[in-house]
Image (cartoon, rainbow, N blue to C red):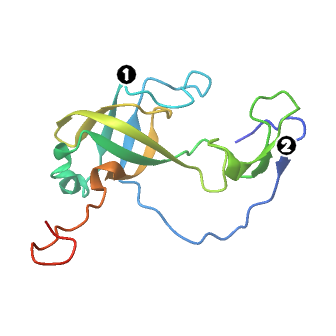
Amino acid sequence: MQFRKRQGETTVTPPEDHDAGLYFIGRIHTPWSDRNDCPRQGRPDGPECRIEIFPPWVDAIEGIDRFERLEILYWLDRSRRDLVRQNPKADGQRFFGTFALRSPQRPNPIGTSVVRLDRIEGPNLFVRGLDCLDGTPLIDIKPDRCAFTPQAPPKPADSPGGP
């Protein structure tokens, strides 16, 4: 794949070996086939998108309907992986290290979105709030972390500081 490099951006040659493998558990279907049309951040009122879960992972979505918001992790398979210094505005003036940006151009191009779950039909989740291209491989789904905010355990009535 041929990538364009903006003036002043810095690239590296990634290592040939890799440290881990991934299982793509599904595929994301969105209205966007061109990166220029894709939103920079997903919006809760954005278009409905479909997340297709592959066998054998379909049973893993059991109970997910208890959550309105989900965190979706996906592999930005059409992103370059060699940029370490980027010029996000393409103005040649402001540069940032890749880890200081939410750019899809990263050594490990993992994208995340918090989405609103509209409905489930078989192995398909229908959501709003995604910001990736049609056909993007799905890495993982988790309930939004705010749904799991730890609460202090109740204090017994006879302990100091109890009621």
Q: Residue at x 41, y 54 (%)?
A: 24
- 140 and 135: which is toward the camera: 140
Disc 1 and disc 2 in contact, CB within 8 angstroms: no
Residue 39 falls left or right of residue 116: right
The tag earlier along the polypeptide, 1 or 2, is 2
Q: Place residue 153 in its image quadrant.
A: bottom left
Mark toward the viewer: 1 or 2: 1
Which quarter of the rendered picture does the C terminus lie within?
A: bottom left
Q: Secondary structure at mark 1?
A: loop
In this view, 120 is above or below 12 = above
Q: Position of residue 150 (x, y in %)?
A: 29, 61
- 94 and 73: which is toward the camera: 94
Q: Position of residue 162 (x, y in %)?
A: 16, 70
Residue 109 falls left or right of residue 31: right
Q: Position of residue 142 (x, y in %)?
A: 33, 53
Report the residue marked by disc 1: 45
Which quarter of the rendered picture does the N terminus lie within?
A: top right
3D distance between C-alphas at marks 1 and 2? 34 Å
Q: Residue at x 22, y 71 (%)?
A: 161
Q: Residue at x 42, y 29 (%)?
A: 30
Q: Residue furthest left?
A: 157
Report the residue marked by disc 2: 9
Q: Is residue 4 visible?
A: yes
Q: Amino acid at mark 2?
A: Glu
Q: Amino acid at mark 1?
A: Asp
- 119 and 25: which is toward the camera: 119
Residue 90 falls left or right of residue 99: right
Q: Secondary structure at mark 2?
A: loop
- 28 and 41: which is toward the camera: 41
Residue 84 falls left or right of residue 31: right
